[in-house]
Amino acid sequence: MKSVLKSDLDNPPQLREFGLQFQKRLNLLCCLACGICLTSRTGISHVKFHLRGLKLRVKKSHLIKICEELGVHNVYPSITDLSGTEALSGLKLYTKALLCPEDHCNAIFASGGAMRHHYRHTHGGKVPDQWTVVPAQKLDKNRNVQYFRVQPPPPAPEPTLNSSWLDDLEADIARINEGYKKEEER
C-alpha cells in the first residue's frame, strides 16, 4: 500500500494550519497523514480529532468559510463514478486489492479474509481459491470504506545517477594515495 501524489492535489495556504490539502478532481479536503478524503462536514470533526492533542481550538465557522471559498463538496461522489478512473492523489493505493469474481458484483477488499467473508455471506457456495488482484482506493475510513478499482499511476521514473561526483571523488582519493606513496618512498 502506498500513497499517490500528483498534480490533482493542491496545498492552499488557508488549509495548512489544519494539516489538510485540497483534492482538485473531487473538490474534497484531503488528509495526507490518514490517506483519506473529507467533505466539508467530515473535515471539521476530523481536524478537531487530529488537533485535540495540541490543545488548539478550531473554529467551525472558520473552516466552513474556507471550504466555501475553495468549493469543497459536502457529500462524497458515488463509488460507481470513481471506479476505473485514474488513481487519486492523497489517497492510499492498495496495489494488491482483491476483486470479487462474481458477475456484476465489483466488490473489492484489501484482504483475503474480508473477501472470503463477503463471498460466503453475499454469494454462498464454494469460496474460490484465487482472486483477481487489482489496484484500488477508498475515500475514507468511515461511511465510504468501500474500495473502488483505479488505474494504477505510471511507475516513478528510475533515478538517474549522475556519477561525475563519484568520478571526481575517486580521482581525489587516487591523488591522496599517490601523495602518501611518494612520502613513504622518501
Image (spheres, rainbow, N blue to C red):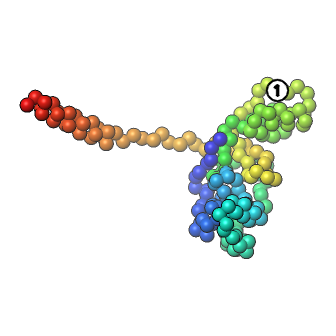
Is label 1 in a helix, a strand or a loop?
loop
Task: Describe residue 42's horizontal placement relative to residue 23 as left or right.
Answer: right
- Name which quarter of the figure residue 19 lies in: bottom right
Which percent across, then down, holds residue 51?
Answer: 67, 63
Of 145 and 130, the residue lying toward us: 145
Give the residue furthest to the left.
Answer: 186
Q: Residue at x 67, y 52 (%)?
A: 34
Name which residue lies at 90% across and 37% down: 122
Based on the displayed image, in which of its 4 quarters is residue 119 positioned? Answer: top right
Numbered-mark total: 1
Q: Nearer the viewer, residue 147 or 104?
A: 147
> Residue flagged by tag 1: what amino acid is it?
Pro
Q: Quadrant of the C terminus?
A: top left
Quarter of the image where the N terminus is located: top right
Is the residue 109 above or below the residue 4 in the image? Answer: above
Q: Is residue 11 left or right of residue 109?
A: left
Residue count near mark 1 (Cα–Cα under 10 Å), binned few <14, some 14–19, many ≥20 = few
Task: Judge whether 39 appears above or below 162 on screen.
Answer: below
Which residue is the site of mark 1? 128
Tell me which residue sits at (23%, 39%) in the image. 172
Q: In front here: 157 or 174?
A: 174
